Image: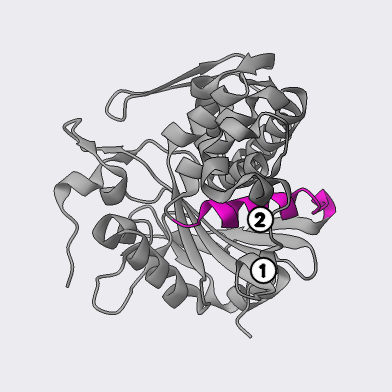
Amino acid sequence: MAKTSPAKRGKSVWGSIGYGVFVLAALGLGTLGGWLESSKVVQKVGLMGVLRPPTPQEAFDGKSTLTVLVLGCDENRSTGGAKITTAAARSDTMLLAKFDFANNEVTGVNIPRDTLCELPGYKDQKINAYHAMGGDALAQKAVEYLLGVHIDRTVTINFEGFRNMINSVGGVYVDVPRDMNYDDNAGHLHIHLKKGPQWLDGRTAEEFARFRHADSDILRQERQHLLIYAMKQRIKQRPQALTAVLDATAQMLSDGFTDQEIVSIGDWLKSVPETNMSFGILPTRNAPHYNLALIKSQVPAVLAKYHLASD
């Protein structure tokens, strides 16, 4: 059976922002303007490939839907403070999303990182550990086994890319709902934000999204939505930043999608109303040693609600 090395038991330094970053990135590549010619993305796919991108069905070989596993993970810190790279880090955020191009819908469920999963050939352990042992491929295999679904693509997003995305538009204006104070010296994480409306740059926006002390998954999702709205507004206000947005987002999602595919998704996402976007979380119960166990009897109904059940 596979074993997890001591170095991989470090604290993660990525908050629950996978969906938010992915949508912001795709929106950035799907937003158009007159400054695109200098973008590296445009140089790759051509100006018309951005101004008039292919439909998602064209970009994805006639598929009417696309199921995507979004992993939020970056450098970890071991108990001694040593850095662990993205490829070897545990996935702190796991979102299973479905893009329904035919019905203009986006749905998904968050998978709690402490959910136990006993993939054949491995011991029963938290599902976020599989990325540390086998990267994107093993993480995808674990989620497919746990939920009995087929996943088309897996994409890993890191917090450096998130910071670059926010900074590319000069920061965002957000009403912070509460004072946020948290220090994790081992994880090199220090969050100190005051309640109230304020400008957040890449670093402070990351802190806003990552804060989890005395918090819940529901509240973290609400903060993600605040950031998404704020970023959408900034993209509209600062079209001159599109070149930087294009290149930052392409780099951030390049491990799971081509530039042309991301441009296509981004252009399509602009037409999806918020009423057609819905997200939930997998049902779990407390298990020994601070783990969570999937409530299997409730899973089919949740997957069906968010259109993730296998056909």
Residue at (61% x, 20% y) in the render: 171
Work out whether 307 lies above or below 284: below
Q: Is residue 76 left or right of residue 105?
A: left
Percent across and percent down for residue 24 are 63, 40
* Mark-to-mark CA distance, 1 and 2: 9 Å
Percent across and percent down for residue 61 are 60, 74
- Residue for badge 1: 58
Magenta-colored stretch includes residue 225: no
Q: Secondary structure at mark 1?
A: helix
Percent across and percent down for residue 229 are 73, 35
> What is the crowding at mark 2: few (fewer than 14 residues within 10 Å), some, or many (at least 20)?
many
- Residue for badge 2: 264
- Depth check: give the residue in front, 141 or 100: 100
Give the amino acid at mark 2: Ser
Total residue callouts: 2
Magenta-colored stretch includes residue 267: yes
Residue 218 in view (yes/no): no
Residue 267 in view (yes/no): yes
Quarter holding residue 118: bottom left
Q: Which residues are magenta?
A: 256-275
Residue at (71% x, 60% y) in the render: 106
Give the amino acid at mark 1: Glu
